Image (cartoon, grey):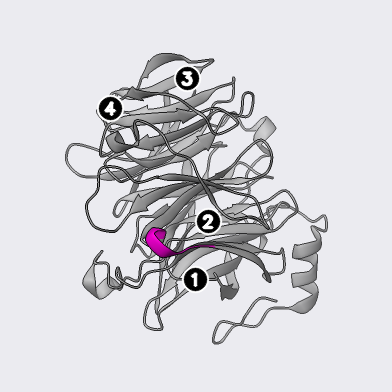
Amino acid sequence: MWGSVPGMEIDRMKRRSFLAGASASLGLSGLTSPAWAAAGAPDFITAGNRADNSSWLVGLTRTGDVVFQIPIPSRGHAAAVNPQVAQVVAFARRPGRFAVVIDCAEGRELARLDAPDGRHFYGHGAFSADGATLFTTENDYDTPAGIIGVWDARGGYRRIGEIPSGGIGPHEILRLSDGGFVVANGGIQTHPDMDRAKLNLTTMQTNLTYLSAEGTVLDQADLTGAMHQNSIRHIAIDHNGAVVAALQWQGAPTQRIPLVLRHTRGTEPEFLHHPDDRRLKTYAGSIAVCPQTGEIAVTGPKGSTVVYFDRQGTPTGSAHHGTASGVAAAPDGGLMITRDGGMVHRKMGIETLVPVTGNWAWDNHLVAR
């Protein structure tokens, strides 16, 4: 059950209609957009910076055309795609306090969300299956605790509650096929007064937390022992419904540490080792799964490398791509990766450069609509 925010109450009947996915108008208090099928919207959303350090949200087609570019106050990170209407909510990079609602059909900003007092966003969010509710990963930084903010997307993105994330430093959140969610709790305590300083590395604890549609913790997978400093940050769902995760090592410098794991509820996390994982420089940036083949791609922007695994988790090689950043499933099959100069389309092991004009420096995520 969603917790309360001071001064805000959840209407019980309205909450039940959110969770049941009852049919209702998809108008968002005037923030209307067409359905995706009729939108003519971009294939991907990403964040990028120009040479002058200005920050933008960018809509891209699979052929590398820039459909829109919307200025934002500071660096962006990832975006949540509304499954029902042609809208995304794009988030500031941690410890940002803003998120931008974008009409992807018209390439315009519809609204901005501000994190409540005592909170900041972690750069990610997810919608309920009916598009009625937005869930955002946030830091309750004075407690400290990780929380999931709950927003009424059909009511003008009014904040209606929050629930515990199940750990410290919740980063990416994904909706599961059963209507619940999985949260990557990265385990790192931060405070905006100290910018991006990591305050608890010796005691940090990272986990995957599985939540029901109502916000109840159903399962947790903790990294313990020697792996407790291997921060779980970015996640994807594989062809069997298991979670695959990109990790960022926070411990003593090392050349060989597993930076990818796979987890199925009720089991222990399985680390996927790759002979080229040292090229990631202990920092896995983004992860995606090809829907057609089950291939897993993990980017390493610090090492300008992408490593690949087949659907069984067996390494299948790697590729060098300058500042390899985001990766997502491509609409025409395969995977798309952002890199210096544009993107790379990978399909059946063949990689093709897709130039994008503008000399963009991409952030870690490429989000497919």
Decide which of 199, 202 is in the foreground and name it: 202
Q: Nearer the viewer, residue 302 or 120?
A: 302
Q: Amino acid at mark 1?
A: Gly
Asked if the residue at tag 3 contacts the one at tag 1, i.e. Cβ–Cβ closer than 8 Å, the answer is no
The location of residue 219, given as percent across then percent down, is 65, 65
The three-letter amino acid code for the residue at tag 4 is Asp
Answer left or right for 251 relative to 106.
left
Q: Amino acid at mark 3?
A: Arg
Q: Which residue is mark 3?
A: 346
- Residue type beneath disc 2: Gly
Q: How packed is label 1: few (under 14 Cα within 10 Å), some, or many (20 or more)?
A: many
- The residue lying at 42 percent from left, 68 percent from top is 205
Is there CB contact under 8 Å for labels 4 and 3? no
Of marks 4 and 2, which one's residue comes earlier in the chain?
2
Magenta stretch: includes residue 329: no
Crowd band around label 4 with a 10 angstrom C-alpha radius: few (<14), some (14–19), many (20+): some
Report whether 220 appears left or right of 72. right
Secondary structure beneath disc 4?
loop
Answer whether residue 226 is magenta in the image: yes
